[in-house]
Amino acid sequence: MSKKPVVLYGASGYTGRLVAEYLREYNIPFIAAGRNAKSIKEVMDGVPGIATASVEVVEVEHTVEALTKLFSGAKVVCNMVGPFIKYGGEVVQASLAAGCHYIDTTGEQDWMRLVDEEFGERFAAKGLLVSPAIAQMYTTSDVAVNLCLETPGVDTLDTLTLWGGMPTYASMQSVFTILMADHFYLEQNEYVQWPAASVFNVTVPGQHQVAMAMPWGGTPHPVWHKRNPRVANVKSLGGVFNQMVMKGVEQIAKMVEEKIKPLPPAEQRKALSEQAAALQSGMPPRENHRVNRTLDSVWATGPNRSVHCVIHGARNYHQTGYLQAFAAHNLIRGRARQAGFASACQAFGHREILAGLQTYGFVGDPIISGHVPSVGVPVFPNTQGRIGV
């Protein structure tokens, strides 16, 4: 039974250590848990400032029974163990059984839909939040989405997220898992499947060159906004700034379609794991604020108006670590705006999340162009066309 309010499950990975770093920033006691206590302790010993944190390392089996026992007494489970469609079921079930809020960092749309459809109402009945995909690639862009939705009359979202760097080992495993699944955009509030291995050339605000992007598994945005009465259509693309890396991802997507999907399930898993490890088997270096930049661009349109929001930032994995700690901090203090299945913006407020990201220097002022509401909405354009909060 946990004597600390947060359990960080999967604490030995790249993202796990960053979540630990920001839990320490918020002065939140936590349990760092996983299948190998030695590995977790080695990672936790390297977290900046960890000597001032209240942290306990626990080794636990990946079963519903063992995890329920560990989570009991805690308030929030931060799950870092992916691919989530493969390993997330036991964790979300144990969180529900133990009476804990559940959050994770997934980008897997099939996992999002499963959580929404199978667990959303069950968590809501207990007054608990279940919020997958609290991560830079999705939450920061959803801040831009919700800033655009402050303009009346828009109902169609076109989102683009780009970042500088390479995916971690765990992220690469998830990328391959995503490529194996069907993924969808939203058209008139219905899921429509993307063509396999879709890749697009996209315009990038602030530069002359185009970039490459792909549906990235469909992203969580169509799932988050399927029931949003303001929204009818959602298409989301993502990628990295480095075009050579994206060309490699394009080749991988085609290889998965042609060579891996025809294999029997057991051979598929083995081939996917081997391919992911070949591309990223080690721990990436700590992010550099000047190098690992992020860009979130959202066009929101309606029958007679449009608005464009761009958020420039840096250190996408650090943003993810911060966002997880921000969510845990608010949940511990009972500040969630709704229970059940919800995005971070729906649960905590997009302007509150934006203010937190800016406090830590992760993002600049959003740049909004097009129709900006002038009545009844608290946004104030300054002379640079940026929006103050």
Image (cartoon, grey):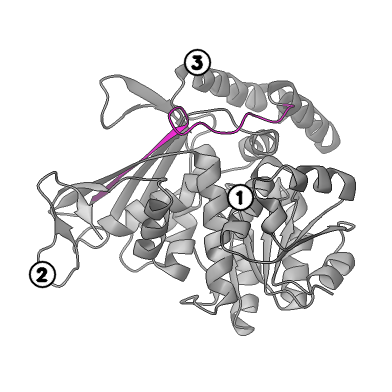
Q: Which residue is mark 3?
A: 244
Query: Helix, strand, or loop for circle 3?
Result: helix
SS under mark 2: loop
Magenta segment: 281-300
Separation of marks 2 and 3 at Cα, in angstroms = 46 Å
Residue for point 51% across, 18% down? 247
Dominant secondary-structure state across the stretch colored magenta: loop
Element type where label 1 sits in the image = loop
Q: Is residue 156 left or right of residue 338?
A: left
Residue 94, given in percent of the width and then of the height, sits at 78, 69
108 or 297, nearer to the observer? 297
Q: Residues within 10 Å of mark 1 (few under 14, many from 20)?
A: many
State left or right for residue 330 relative to residue 362.
right
Q: Earlier in the sequence, mark 1 or mark 2?
A: 1
> Could you classify mark 2 by the number of other residues whose Cα lies within 10 Å: few (under 14), some (14-19), or many (20 or more)?
few
226 or 341, nearer to the observer: 341
Check if mark 1's residue and mark 3's residue have beta carbons within 8 Å.
Answer: no
The residue under label 2 is 375
Viewer-closest of 31 and 52: 52
For the point 49% across and 58% down, the residue is: 223
The image quadrant where one finds the C terminus is bottom left
Q: Amino acid at mark 3?
A: Met
Q: On the image, numbered disc 1 is attached to which residue? A: 106
Q: Position of residue 202 (x, y in %)?
A: 34, 28
Q: Is residue 279 magenta?
A: no
Q: Give the CA distance from mark 1 to mark 3.
A: 25 Å
Q: Are marks 2 and 3 in contact (CB under 8 Å)?
A: no
Q: How many marks?
A: 3
